[in-house]
DNA sequence: CAGTGGTCTAGACCACAGG
DNA sequence: CTGTGGTCTAGACCACTGG
């Protein structure tokens, strides 16, 4: 049995995938080390390393120094979701994007918000409520708190034509953040704005971003009924 | 100003990140090419490449041959979610895992299901309903269809002690799949099983996996009220 | 056409962790 | 202690694509 030679890391990856899918290498199995595979595949070890590292990143392999590389027992599926600016998300689908500012004011936030953002409970933050539309239909309601001590320029911005969603990305980059996905029942207000029955089950995204140790903004996006986000595995 | 020398790709990445966050390199800016950066950083071009490629993968840089590397204008946040087996998900939180099979039968599926799975509309599939519990409280309801033509062994499995969620990962690996997240209102049955009011807003995950051209399984996981999935950005 | 990123190579050293 | 993966290097060629 002549194993053909592989010329690039993707073909090496494909071959490894083939062996896993064909159960030639079963979950839990120890596979040959990089040096041996490089020899077998007729390529440099670096190339094998690149292929295996990529598979390990996607959760299909478990690699440990000295212990070697094993086919993952329970391949933790890594679903990578692209969270884009809402405008481009809509425009990429060929729909017309619309935007309406509902409210913009400086306001002392609820305790839960100041706590999550690590801001002084008595200090006002900039609060924004806005609606994003796709083909003139409500698409997502944006409920946002902005930390004006970190983003003072936000106080000068009206957010009437450019959404905070977009403005912040441009003028207030963040170093890290958290994101959460959940389901929520439409309140009376939300139902009104999104034009759906009260108590509808709505998909929501919560995001909290930081610039080093200071919170930049906290936002909840509540989507139209039936909204889903999808990706491939 | 002496730029210190950087000895590994992560320190190079950190330095690039620092320049982006400090707005020394602003969104849209063209940054120096790999060769120049390698010279400046006192390392091999390969090392710079590794650092920049990693940042491009995470959406922070846009790289194009000949056009060079730019700081992404709208950093598409890539949220990577780890979708593990439900049992380990619960156990990793230090909770007690429980499992109850509710129903297991061969059944001709609704048209929507056979269409999505590309199976013959008249052929029965294996249908499973089961409940996952955390600390004896309902955690997630699993509604599943298994293609017995692809996974004949499933017909011999009772799924009384091992959930299909886990069994399939072990005995029926997939080559690719799709996953979607959405909100759904609890039906009467779902409310009963999950012990929550009818019409509650519930978070749900739909997954459809394939072994090459044949569908393996289609599953909907409906979670307890208040459930959310979170990750860092 | 020419500049950029993408990749491969052969060899080397190192960090980690299993036994 | 030793085998494994993790990484760096210097140099080379290639693929793509902007101008």
Image (cartoon, coloured by chain):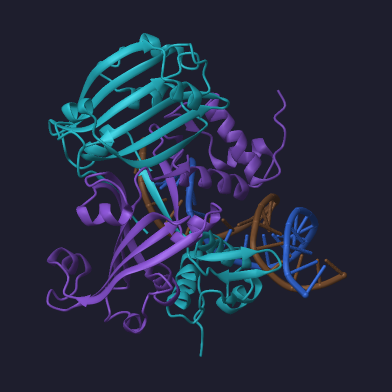
Chain colours: A cyan, B purple, C blue, D brown
> Of residues B50 and B116, which is closer to you in this image?
B116
Is A226 on the left or on the right of B167, as rendered? left
> Of residues C10 and A92, which is closer to you in this image?
A92
Image height check: is A61 above or below A156? below
Residue located at (40% from left, 69% from top): B163
Percent x, y of residue A151: 46, 16
Residue located at (33% from left, 11% from top): A105
> Of residues B4 and A32, which is closer to you in this image?
A32
Residue B203 seen in render: yes
Number of labels in the image equals 0
> Of residues B29 and A123, which is closer to you in this image?
A123
- Image quadrant assignment for residue B132: bottom left
Percent x, y of residue B121: 13, 74
Image height check: is A170 above or below A50? above
Quadrant that contains the N terminus of chain B: top right
Percent x, y of residue B224: 35, 49
Residue B64 seen in render: no
Residue located at (38% from left, 12% from top): A107
Is A117 on the left or on the right of B6, as rendered? left
Image height check: is C5 above or below A193? below
Image height check: is A225 above or below B216? above
Percent x, y of residue B137: 42, 54
- Image quadrant assignment for residue A204: top left
Is B38 on the left or on the right of B213, as rendered? right
């Amino acid at each position: 049995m002549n194993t053909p030679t592989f010329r690039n890391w993707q073909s090496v990856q494909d071959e490894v995938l083939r062996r896993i899918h064909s159960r030639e290498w079963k979950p839990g199995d120890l596979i040959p080390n990089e040096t041996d595979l490089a020899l077998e595949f007729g390529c440099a070890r670096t190339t094998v390393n690149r292929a295996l590292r990529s598979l390990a990143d996607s959760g299909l392999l478990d690699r440990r120094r000295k212990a070697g590389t094993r086919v993952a027992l329970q391949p933790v599926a890594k679903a990578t979701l692209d969270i884009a600016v809402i405008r481009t998300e809509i425009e990429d689908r060929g729909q017309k994007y619309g935007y309406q500012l509902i409210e913009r004011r400086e306001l002392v936030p609820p305790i839960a918000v100041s706590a999550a953002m690590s801001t002084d409970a008595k200090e006002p933050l900039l609060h924004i409520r806005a609606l994003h539309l796709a083909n003139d239909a409500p698409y997502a309601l944006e409920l946002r708190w902005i930390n004006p001590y970190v983003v003072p320029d936000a106080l000068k911005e009206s957010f009437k034509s450019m959404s905070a969603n977009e403005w912040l990305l441009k003028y207030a980059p963040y170093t890290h953040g958290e994101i959460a996905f959940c389901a929520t029942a439409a309140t009376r207000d939300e139902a009104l704005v999104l034009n759906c029955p009260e108590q509808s089950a709505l998909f929501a995204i919560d995001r909290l971003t930081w610039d080093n140790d200071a919170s930049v903004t906290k936002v909840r996006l509540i989507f139209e009924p039936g909204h889903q986000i999808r990706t491939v595995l």
